[in-house]
Image (spheres, rainbow, N blue to C red):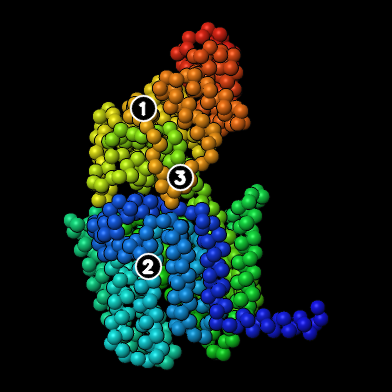
Amino acid sequence: MTDGKITLVKEKISQLLQKPFVIPVTLAALIALAYGLLTPWMGFYWDDLPFAWFLRFFGPTEFIEAFRPFRPLLGYIFAATTSLFGEHPLTWQLLGLLVRFLLGLQVWSLLRKVFPTREQSVLWVVLLFTVYPAYGQQWVALTHINQELIPLLFLFASFIVTVNLLRNNKRSIPLTALAILLQVIGLFSTEYFFGLEILRFFFIIVVFAETISGKKELLKKTLLQWLPYLLVWIANAAWTYFYHQSDAYNSYEISILAMLSPLALVNEFITTLSLSGFISWLGTFNIFSIVDGSATQIIAFVVLIVAGGMVFVVANHKRQDITSNTPLAASYWFILIGLVAIFAGRLPSWAAGLPLKIEFDYDRFFVSIMLGASLFIVGLADLMLREGRAKVIFLSIMIGMSTAYQFTVANTYRRDWANTQDLFWQMAWRMPALEKNTAILTYELPLKYLSDHQLMSALNWMYAPDLSGRELPYALQYLKTRFTPSEIRADHPIEIAYRTVTFRGNTSNSVIIYKEADGCLRVLDPVYNNAETIPGASFYLINALQFSDPSLIVINAAMPTMESSIFGNEPEHGWCYTYSQAEIARQSGDWEKVVKLYKEAQQADLFPALPVEYLPFIEAFARTGDIETALKLTERTAKGQPTLCPALHTLWGRVSSLEAEQTLRQICAP
């Protein structure tokens, strides 16, 4: 290619990059890279699953009553959106991408009006805001779209209307009323963004500061302009406080007075600023701290290159031409407003006594901090690096790293949903049906983004597809979090009030399950899957095991109907299917079938990931007279996991084989 053609191509690219659609396209591409690559494999997380269950069995209006004790106005948002979009997880994941795109456009529109001479700096804020790494719950879509992101859309829209009125020098009562209405929806529906109203004051003062030099006049005019919104803010504070003190409220307690000591305030200041302003960005580099060559890491590296390169090219063509003789003033505004927004965003969770952590599920509190953190870091970059290429490279790398980091977080959600679906299919294989009022108890399950009461909705979705009342027939509880040691005893009541539904049962009407990350689901019992088969398990699990009653499992029932949108399609029948069927056969005393299942698994080249899963097959071979095979599997089990030797001794004690006892003494000798 000749120099002339190269120059022509560069000119065309330059012209293209000046088009108004470039920024929205860049924003959409960044969102797709950070959050959208794994969308088809995402599901429901945290409160998404019970919300989808409530929607299916009780309808959209159920949210109004379900949220009354927590956020009484938020239920109306849930009712409206779920009426429109239904309960399919893919729909909500796609909506999550759209809402993030709209939020990015709002921030772009708002800050361009507030800082019209800082085009590139505003762009940096928008892009950093979009992939802010400390907020890692983008994929908890049904919950957070309604609970936070839609109210934030309304609040940002209110800011935009206010700033547009100032820029157009208008005094429009209808538009002011519109801004107040949007403010009311944004603030009264959820407490997450209560503190962010202070940003309106700063946006107003920045606009007025362009034409008003006197500080007193500037402050007076700003306060007068902000007054109607301030009154709404005060009303919101009063309403929130009195509602939280009323008998109708049943959630977090406000505890500001207990946290106003100087030491607590200093500690909170340091923690919040360091986490949101520095550690959140620096932590993204951890994804490449160890090069393991995994597919996730390779894709993340490609995302880094593509996102960082794209941002560099676009931003480099948006280099701002600053003619102002005080270019640093805007940088100070960015830093100041950023700091204010960080601590204003932290205020609600801090008042509730909730910690700020970059880990699930506390990272949800960063949703109200991410705009402030983005303004703060861009202000620092403007101040320290000015408008040179170094700043473009630095911020492009930060955005690229944050995008890659969000992709790696997305992959953990993908895996967790796959593990959740696998868990319920294994439940269906091992427990085709359950007697009513059965509680499924376990210490904890190897899932990160779903806990016991959230999983309980899927349990009832699976085993009670025709539920019409508000008494749940089944419960799932973690012994770790729902019981004290003294409560793990026979006939201890299990009473659960979950939003608008209840469960009533007791510990003696329960089935104890256990699952390691790499292993199959196991139903524990005092005889076959007893304490000796779970060496090192928590005393909570050991103490509860005596109450596990496998007879509550209806083993001759047909498998439950599994809704594919929630549980996925039935997985390939691998080892865990064989193991579950063997456990059912053992439970019914059909040892011949257990032997047959093992032989079929061998032919299919299927083997357990954990040695403990050989136990039912060892006993089956022993009871059917094939001592040689039973001893081979015994030796394999003992060598694979020596801590199972007590369980093997107990197993062979049931079979009463002298030869096995001699073999065990050799294998399990200290």
Mark 3 lies on residue: 420
The picture quadrant where one finds residue 659 is: top right
Q: Identify the residue shown where x is 41% and y is 88%.
A: 167
Mark 1 and mark 2: Cα distance apart in space:
46 Å
Indicate whether 373 appears above or below 534.
Answer: below
Q: Is there a contact, CB below 8 Å, between mark 1 and mark 3? A: no
Which residue appears farthest toward the top when viewing the image?
658
Q: Position of residue 617 (x, y in %)?
A: 52, 22
Q: Amino acid at mark 3?
A: Thr
- Return the mark for residue 550: 1
Q: Position of residue 181 (x, y in %)?
A: 29, 77
Indicate whether 522 appears above or below 621.
Answer: below
- Return the mark for residue 150: 2
Of 7 and 69, the residue lying toward us: 7
The picture quadrant where one finds residue 575 is: top right
Q: Position of residue 567 (x, y in %)?
A: 44, 46
Q: Secondary structure at mark 1?
A: helix
Instruction: Name the N-terminal-most of marks 1 and 2.
Output: 2
Q: Left or right? Give the position of 598 relative to 485.
A: right
Instruction: Name the N-terminal-most of marks 1 and 3.
Output: 3
Q: Identify the residue shown where x is 33% and y is 70%.
A: 186
